[in-house]
Amino acid sequence: MLFGFLFRTIDEWRDWRRIVSEAPGKIIFHVSDVQPSGTGGGLERHSALDEVETFDDETDNEMG
C-alpha cells in the first residue's frame, strides 16, 4: 500500500510530523529521516516495469 502526502511548506511538514508523533493509539506507519536498512538497496526489481500491462479504453470499448 502506498501513501502520499503533499506539504506546501516545511512548517506544514514539521506540524504534520508533530501531530503524527503525538497521536494516541496504535501506530500504523513510521516517519523516518533516513531510509531504513533492509529496504531498497537492490531489492527493487527493475524488470518489473516490463511486466506492467496497459489497457486502451478505446480498444476495450470497441470490443464490447
Image (cartoon, rainbow, N blue to C red):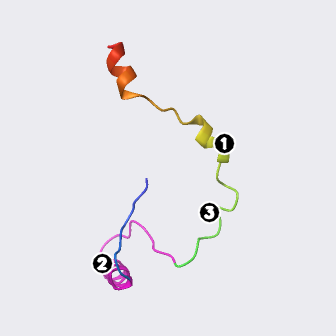
In the image, residue 43 above or below residue 10:
above
Q: Which region shows up in magenta?
A: 10-32
Q: Residues within 10 Å of mark 3 (few under 14, many from 20)?
A: few
The label on residue 23 is: 2
Q: CA distance from mark 2 to mark 3?
A: 26 Å
Residue visible at 32% across and 81% down? 12
Amino acid type at mark 1? Ser
> Which comes before the other along the chain, label 2 or label 1?
2
> Which comes before the other along the chain, label 2 or label 3?
2
Q: Residues within 10 Å of mark 2 (few under 14, many from 20)?
A: few
Q: Position of residue 30 (x, y in %)?
A: 45, 71
The label on residue 22 is: none
Q: Nearer the viewer, mark 2 or mark 1?
A: 1
Residue annotated with mark 1: 47
Q: CA distance from mark 2 to mark 1?
A: 39 Å
State the residue in front, 8 or 51.
8
Q: Position of residue 58 (x, y in %)?
A: 36, 24
Label 1 close to label 3 by CB (< 8 Å): no
Helix, strand or loop at disc 2? Answer: loop
Classify the position of the C terminus by image quarter.
top left
